[in-house]
Image (cartoon, helix red, strand yellow):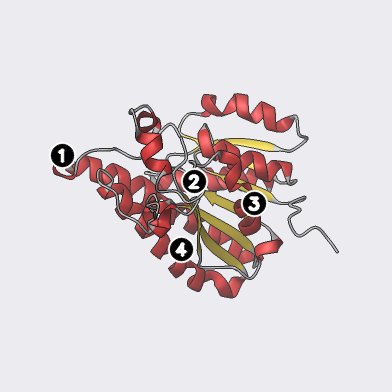
Amino acid sequence: MSNLFDLSGKVALVTGASRGLGQQFARVLANAGADLAITSRTLASLEPFAAEMRLLGQRVACVELNVREQASIEKAVAAVLTELGQIDILVNNAGCNIRKRAVEVTWDDWNTILDTNLRGAFFVAQAVARHMIERRAGRIVNIGSVTCVAGYAGLGPYGASRGGVKQLTMSLAHDWGEYGITVNCLAPGWFKTAQNRALYEVPGWVEYLCERIPLGRPGTPSDLDGALLLLASDAGRYITGQTILVDGGVSVGAVRAVEQK
């Protein structure tokens, strides 16, 4: 039987790949055989990682992209198609957060978060889907978060944006399913990233968190590898419109069990 997870001959576009989970997603896809297009608002930030990926023997295109600007989105997708010829997989990863108490969130804070995480995700998917529709094939993986399904203090706009990504994923799956395009949402739980690093430095935070994660620990980047490959490859060809939570079980609402005497 052929390897359903093999991505040889495919081209994967990963947005927000200058650091963190974006780089991990790109690395996993490249190791499975895909050529890469990686994006950031600053091209220089991509070069060290691009050099690493080229050592794997993959073609790598570095593309400047600001998902808050429609012209930048259109230009970036056109550049990928010119350099690599096709886009088979989109990992819609670019995102941001501004962590504040709800009463302190400004109008501009809201716009920054929603324009990046929700509006940006839609218009990147739209630009890529036009190409995928012509080829009648494609895999779109929107990156969400456990906040797609759970609310947390200090994350009002962020949670609204991620909840929107979940709903958007379902709508686009229906819109584009007839063209052979699958659209899913990969939703990590609590992973230490540049966005939330400060939380992990708060005394007692990790212990508090682990009490609520049935598997007893925060996530590590490699915990997402299998789910990403499933959604990006032919192994997931009949999965669409779904939000796959990779969260150690935190979304079940667990707390430390009370020992019975």
Quadrant position of residue 61: top right
Q: Which circle's residue, 4 or 3, is located before the other in the chain?
A: 4
Q: Which quadrant of the view contains residue 95?
A: top left
From the image, tell me which residue sits under label 2: 93
Give the distance between the C-alpha atoms of the residues marked 3 and 2, in whole angstroms: 17 Å
* Mark seen at residue 226: 3
How far apart, in angstroms, are the residues tagged by discs 1 and 2? 27 Å
Q: Which mark is residue 147?
A: none
Query: Which residue shows up at 53% across the image and 39% down it?
Result: 21
Amino acid type, residue under disc 2 in the picture: Asn
Amino acid type, residue under disc 3 in the picture: Gly
Category of crowding for the residue at label 2, using alpha-carbon neighbours closer than 10 angstroms: few (below 14), some (14–19), many (at least 20): many
Q: Amino acid at mark 1?
A: Glu
In the rendered structure, are the residues bearing label 4 and label 1 in contact, judged by CB atoms less than 8 Å apart? no
For marks 4 and 2, give the CA distance: 13 Å
Residue at mark 3 to residue at mark 1: CA–CA distance: 38 Å
Q: Nearer the viewer, mark 4 or mark 3?
A: 3
First in sequence, mark 3 or 1: give its number.
1
- The nearer-to-camera label among 3 and 1 is 3
Of residues 75 and 176, the one nearer the viewer is 176
Marks 3 and 4: in contact by CB < 8 Å?
Answer: no
Q: Percent x, y for residue 129?
A: 54, 60
Would you name the residue on which mark 4 appears? 169
Q: Position of residue 84 (x, y in %)?
A: 68, 45
Give the numbered dot on residue 104: 1
